[in-house]
Image (cartoon, coloured by chain):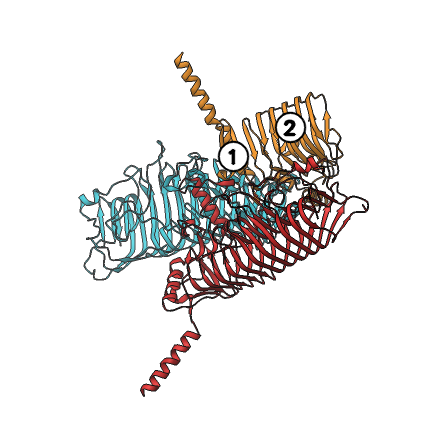
Chain colours: A red, B cyan, C orange
Amino acid sequence: MSTKRYILSFIFFLLISSVFATEYNASFFGIKSNGTTLNTSSIQKAVNFISERGGGTLKFYVGRYLTGTIVLKPNVTIHLEEGAVLVGSTNIYDYNIDTPNCALIYGKGVDNIAIKGKGVIDGQGREVAYHLMDQIHNGIIADPLDYDRPRNRRPKAIYLRECSNVRIEGVTIRNAADWVQTYDQCEDIVIDGITVDSKAFWNNDGIDIVDCKNFKLLNSFIDSADDAICLKSHDASKRCENVEIRNCVARSSANGIKFGTVSAGGYKNIRIINNKVYDTFRSAFTIATPDGGIVEDILVDSLYAYNTGNPLYLRIGARWNNGRQGALSNVVIQNMYVEVAADKPDAGYSYEGPVEDNPRNISPSSIVGLKDQPIRNVTLRNIAFVYPGGGNPNYAYRGTTEEELAAIPEMADAYPEFSQFKELPAWGFYIRHAEGITFENVKLRAEAKDYRPALVLDDVKGYDVSGLTVEEGKNKKKKQIFVQNSKK
Amino acid sequence: MNKLFLVIFLVVSQWCRAQEFQAGDFGILADGQTLNTRSIQAAIDHIHEKGGGKLVFSAGNYVTGTIYLKSNVTLHLEEGASLLGSNNPFDYVKDPYVNWQSMIFAIKQRHIGITGKGTINGRGFQTAVNAVQNVHRGIVEDELKLDRVREWNRPENIYFRECEDVTIQDITLRDPGSWNQTYDQCVNLLVERIKVDSKSYWNNDGIDIVDCRNVVIRDSYFDAADDAICFKSHDANAFCDSILVENCVARSSASALKFGTVSRGGFKNFVVRNLTVYDTYRSAITFAAVDGGFVENILVDGVRSINTGNVIFLRIGDRWSQGKKPYMKNITIKNVYAEVPLDKPDAGYNYEGPIEDLPRNISPASIVGLPEYKIENVRLENIELVYPGGGNPLYAHRGTDPSELDSIPEMADKYPEFSQFKELPAWGFYIRHAKNIDFKNVTFKAARKDYRPAIVTDDLTGGTWTGVRFEEPQSDEKKQYIFHNSQNINVD
Amino acid sequence: MKRIAYLGLFFLMAANVQAAEYNASLFGCKSDGVTNNTSSIQYAIDFISGKGGGTLHFYVGRYLTGSFELKSNVTIELHEGAVILASPNVYDYLNYSGSRALIYANGQSNIKIQGKGVIQGQVPLFTANMENLTSKGIVRKDSQHLLPDLIRIENSEQVTVDGIMLLNGLENVQSYIGCRQLSLSNQIIKSNAYGSSTGIFLSACSAVELRSLYVDASGKPLREEGKNEIRLQENCVTPNGKKL
């Protein structure tokens, strides 16, 4: 063989191996699909091995693969074929509980990773949480048991921190013991076509996007006990930026799509397009910035919500803001349709949202800033919200006199929630401490008579509600708009 | 005896025609989640008050805690129907009369049964684990002996006490938290075609018959972590009487067919036919009279024992006798083929039997009475015992000098187990404190040479031995039996 | 003298120790809305009462249960968001000398249910279940006696139910018979799912105080039988603003 030919074939070989990243079957590493063998060490070995060899795909075929925490390494793809289930161990000690944010699949500072395929990741979260509870009650693990549940050490299904070039495609993620999946300070992420089914335990957020840049969540279905699609900002020096959420369907016993609660840094340039929300206990869409976060350039287009506790809640608070004031400005919400439930919209789901802030008639949508920090430039365009109405003043009452409106507490440092003020004076929309609020083609409808007006504005500078139409039962003559301390 | 069985069948067949009630009609849900305890109880009470009948469970998973079966009611589990035990220990009643926990109780009831091809699954492992947690949390008291909650504080699948005309047919019994099924002081009990898969937790016996009369167990399969087919006598004034065990298969990480350990009253008039034993850690057949009870008139005919640690262990002890005099006599064991393995016969099963009484070479079959209480009139006929042999004196040694034989402890008050004496001086059979032990056509085979003789007797009076044969490699000159302090043994 | 003072101190401390706090999860109660917690709740109450009393805390979540009995010196604290969810199965209710209830007490003293939590009946499911049993001939048509109250307390003293929301009862949301020093306060009662549902039923009670009750019931908000001594009634209204 000539040298030339030798070199050529060598190059060819290199090309092949780089183009077709190598695939490894799980069984190659002694990983067992029987559902009872604990595979943690074997899977970890496989991930390490593949990463050390320059990367490739670890393939799981049909079967149940029991495992504890797996730490992802660069250039490794986990591929779960249809029928393959990565099953979380029910033993809390099989997880990296000494690391904050322990998780079944854990990655920190890793580049170019993926989880793909039609398989399932099942955290067995309820059983894991129960085992953790046992250990806490026995005094082995210390935990304050807030609300009679473990505060710390509940494993997430996926936790990635400071990772880049991440692809999560096609998989179903089920039954986490805590938030389902968290992407914290990650860049260049695409999550496409996943299913989240997680009502296994408290705080089962569907997806948490924390301080991420260039993030796309596409074509996914999320059904979760806590907030379904959730953007957060934990670090005051970071923020979520360039996030796109498109073509998703969400169900939640909390909020459908939420910014917050923790919102230290903020959110910029977020596009939420063509999504659906149903059977959701709290708000279809909510932005809360109680911790100093700056929220700007937000577009919500084509959001449809059915059987939902509340359509919309925008809030600035002052909870953990450490002197820095949060801001919320330049929000466009267009083509949004919401039907609000008369009864509990999430009735029958495990871990239903809590019955709270009573007595209270059906709460309106709200935009509530702070006295010295109004919410600025919110445009509502082509909107229809349908409420059940029926507010009864003998059950709960909030009048529209100056004193009564002034008596509504600011609750700046309270946990922000659409129901936090208990009874509000409007059935459709309540806006306080805002600037530049525009209603273009906004329809509010109450099915039954309500003792409250449709809209109350209090301390709003520069409002234009000329595009508002109101329908309340057969009540044609009622004054539906109350304005206090505000100007157009 | 046969007449009595006939009576049972007549009774059974008459009440099989009883009215059927569907579980679903009582709102009993097959969703595998709803706790049905009180609905099932209401259904049983209703049927009982209407004069009796069958409560039929169609396919599905029915979760329940403790229920009480009442007279003239049969639970019928259709194929695919499972009664699942709740995993909350507080969902079980500890019945004050029997002082024990169970999923299904019947106390002083008549004409009752559990039938059908469905399953009773105690899901006992998780329940037992949860019970341990409750103790650790300080909300339940238990001494946690051997790091487990005591047997009576864990639920069995079935506990019937002082019941008459009981039929257990076709069902599968799985995974109890304690023993599996106990029939205590019951009369006319028919157990047939059942499957027992009972290795989910410690003390998972297959079946426990305590002080019962007129019992038939047949065509059944037992796989148990603890003793598989177990007869007990808890009451010094009661005993097991008139019992037929036939066509059964047993696997156990303890003993396959056992009388005892608790043996206060006694056991008499037994026929055991066509028993298959495999993968069993201790003895294929063990009769213990250690608490003042008796064993009398027992026929064991047809045993095939494969991969089982020990073949026969008959023992009189003096543990909790309280002055009552034990005896064991008139026992015939015939048509037995047994293979004893070199390694642990139950290796790989959950809750394997404990490795204990070491060092010890392979233990022989034994008949061991006490100096003052001899085991009498035992006839062993048409028996082939295949041992691995290979006993190594450097590992464990018990010689056959008189002083060495005399030094074997009596262990009268100890828990009786074939291995309790550690090394014994024979590889095939060891007999001590007995009268009239007859061997007819008995073959002993050792696969490899053993340092011990095949048979040692000590304090045996009387016996006719015909056709006793030995096969052991490299042992042409070896004397295969040693008689110590023994007399009137006629060897042909 | 000094010794007596010490002794007094000791008793104070002992009393302090006795008023212990217990989380429901300690007894294996599950807040998932589907686990039937009856046995665990009853065990907890018996345990706490046996220890001299204390508080059983239920935090946010839905605790499915059938009948359980309150015992002296035990407080049930339902924190905001906690729901005691009544089983829809009639057989999950025990027969207490002819009547049924989700939460029952007889002959106890110093019993309390408090907090912003909820006690919730599942009326449509329950009545459907009853109709099914009736149509099958398993329960008789005149089975009114099978309808459980959410709370029924008999012959007890120092009884307090404070702050609770009571939803969807059957004939009687809550019944008090022969009680002394009965205090009902800050309750929201909404019970319209059953044909005629009484919010509060009182019979032969003395030293009764009713404060800040909102009673929205399909039957009478307050029904009395025999002689009751209602010492105080303030701020108690129905949906149309009328007093009880």
- Classify residue C231 by image quadrant: top right
Q: Is residue B367 left or right of residue A133?
A: left
Viewer-nearest residue: A442 or A277? A442
Provide residue A145's location: percent of width, then percent of height: 48, 40
- How many marks on residues? 2
Q: Amino acid at mark 2?
A: Leu
Q: Give the residue pinned by disc 2.
A: C184
From the top left corner, tell me how far across and down residue B175 is, in percent: 47, 49
Tags 1 and 2 in contact by the CB under 8 Å rule? no
Label 1 belongs to which residue? C44
- Rendered image quadrant of residue A11: bottom left
Q: Is residue A113 visible?
A: yes
**Mark 1 packing: few (<14 Cα in 10 Å), some, or many (20+)?**
many
Amino acid residing under circle 1: Ala
Q: Residue at left 61%, top 55%?
A: A330
- In the rendered structure, the answer to whether residue B479 lies left or right of residue C17 reads left
